Image (cartoon, rainbow, N blue to C red):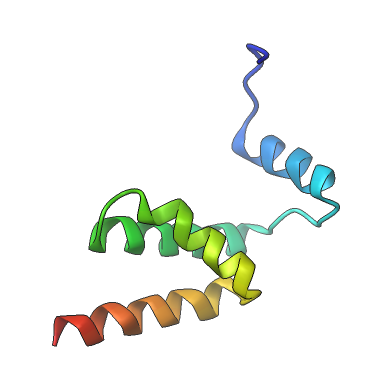
């Protein structure tokens, strides 16, 4: 692997091109980070990337996914 370090934005833009996708906008990135944070803080850190992968497979919007995650956590707490 190369020693070149990219900014997160540059890396995401480049990887999106490799996947044939548009890069996520800042709002989408924020919601994905919120979802990852919820998954990691409510269980184990490993849940963060896997939760993000799951919403990609499910094909749902990060905003909807965050709402579902928050509902799931609140239902488990009661």
**Horizontal relation, residue 72 to residue 24: left or right:** left
Give percent across and percent down for residue 55: 56, 69
Quadrant of residue 28 within the rendered picture: bottom right
Give percent across and percent down for residue 5: 62, 20
- Identity of the residue drawn at 74% across and 41% down: 15
Give percent across and percent down for residue 52: 52, 60
The residue closer to the viewer here, 54 or 41, is 54
Give the residue furthest to the top: 3
- Identity of the residue drawn at 80% across and 49% down: 19
The residue closer to the viewer here, 43 or 34, is 43
Give the residue furthest to the left: 78
Q: Which image quarter holds the N terminus?
A: top right
- Identity of the residue drawn at 24% across and 87% down: 75
- Identity of the residue drawn at 27% across and 77% down: 73
Give percent across and percent down for residue 39: 34, 62
* Residue 32 in the image: above or below residue 76: above
Quadrant of residue 68 within the rendered picture: bottom left
Q: Which image quarter holds the C terminus?
A: bottom left
């Amino acid at each position: 692997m190369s020693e070149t370090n990219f900014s997160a934005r540059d890396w995401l833009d480049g990887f999106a091109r490799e996947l044939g996708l548009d890069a996520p906008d800042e709002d989408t990135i924020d919601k994905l980070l919120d979802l990852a944070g919820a998954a990691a803080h409510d269980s184990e850190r490993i849940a963060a990337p896997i939760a993000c992968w799951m919403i990609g497979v499910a094909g749902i919007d990060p905003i909807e996914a965050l709402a579902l995650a928050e509902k799931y956590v609140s239902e488990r707490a009661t």
